[in-house]
Image (spheres, rainbow, N blue to C red):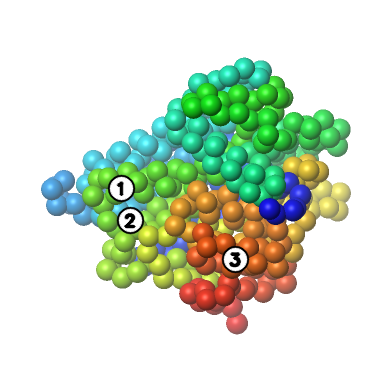
Amino acid sequence: MIQTPHTIDRRTFIALAGGALVSCAGALTGCSGTQGDSGSVTASKAGSAGSDSSPKVQSTTLFVFDTVVNISAQCSKKVMDEVADRCTYFENKFSRTVEGSDIWNINNAGGKPVEVAHETAEVIEAAIRYAEESDGLFDITIGAVSSLWDFDNEVKPADEDIQAALPHVDYRTITVDGTTVTLSDPEAKLDLGGIAKGYITDDLVALFKKSGVRDASISLGGNVYVMGKSFDGDAWNVGVQDPNGAQDDVLATVKTRNRSLVTSGLYERGFEQDGTFYYHILDPKTGYPAATDLKSASIMTKKSVLGDAYSTILFLLGHDRAMELIESDERFEDGVLVDMDDRATKSDGSTFKILQD
């Protein structure tokens, strides 16, 4: 088991897919680790001319989960519309702030059991497994603390409010029985910001496969999955954003197929107050930004839900322990870490190409 303090974060990531630069920033819940406020989806869809029997490349841009989502696939317009509808479905189930969502209902049930969709039960069960594996390094009950911070408006909570919320951060208060979820602590709050996008990405991949789609690029605000071949017929070229650069600056690239790449790190979101800089990655043990010697941690996996949770865990472990875990756990196929001195290192046997001088 990993012996480290409780922590959780957001991720920022960039993908270079099939010659097109796809910029991804954020997570399901905003940089504080809380869920998005929008509760709405807007989409702009464009596809090449052709009948559904001869699918061309279809592209969809959505604003959902409080971030921009970009999806492209060689498929029919009907399939792409189903993908957009699926994203709306998950927003209305997983959002902490959308009234009537499964997570909203759990957080406002006062400790009573709540019946939820099977997908909600599945993602919560996955989160509990990762919390157990990391001895609480990953904890979706962070919502009691993360909801106090507002990094967009540069609001630091009062110390007494943070201290009052900390006792309610404990994943062991969650019980899942089939599709019934109970929080034994009425003041605990779930926040799926560290895992939901990974789960949704995997769900969309499954939808594409069921529809016979072979080639696609899915970018959900930091979680990127590339299927099959790029639309030029080659392997996809995926890049990791430079933590110190602009949103389109990359420091490492890798050619891959049928894989997910997720990055957690210190990307832009934070503010300075009274001489102290507060960044968006919180330590639920203290309620304040956590300490680490990393600026970012990127992990490649077959399942995006795994990469979503573990990019958080790796980031907070720090460089040496994170690299040890990447290289010792067969679930992790590749990784790149960037330390506070801006040195990028890749895991043993990595196929990443570091672009730094």
Residue at (62% x, 20% y) in the render: 108
x, y percent for residue 71: 37, 50
**Amino acid under disc 3:** Ser
Q: In this rendered view, identify the residue nearer to me: 290 or 127.
A: 127
Q: Circle 1: is it few (<14), some (14-19), or many (20+) Cα within 10 Å? A: many
Q: Circle 3: is it few (<14), some (14-19), or many (20+) Cα within 10 Å? A: few
Camera-side mark, 1 or 3: 3
Q: Which residue, given by chain and number where applicable, does mark 3 sit on?
A: 328
Label 2–label 1 contact, CB within 8 A: yes
Image quarter of the C terminus: bottom right
**Position of 23 compared to 298: left or right?**
left
Camera-side mark, 3 or 2: 3
Looking at the picture, does residue 143 appear above or below residue 177?
below
Camera-side mark, 2 or 1: 1
Element marked by disc 3: helix
- The number of numbered discs placed on residues in the rendered structure image is 3
Residue at (27% x, 45% y) in the render: 210
Q: Is residue 235 visible?
A: yes
Which label belongs to residue 216? 2
Looking at the picture, does residue 287 appear above or below residue 21?
above
Q: Quadrant of residue 18?
A: bottom left
**Amino acid under disc 1:** Phe
Mark closer to the chain start, 3 or 2:
2
Mark closer to the chain start, 1 or 3:
1
Q: In this rendered view, identify the residue nearer to me: 84 or 142.
A: 142
Mark closer to the chain start, 2 or 1:
1
Which label belongs to residue 208? 1
**Amino acid under disc 2:** Ala
**Position of 15 compared to 290: left or right?**
left
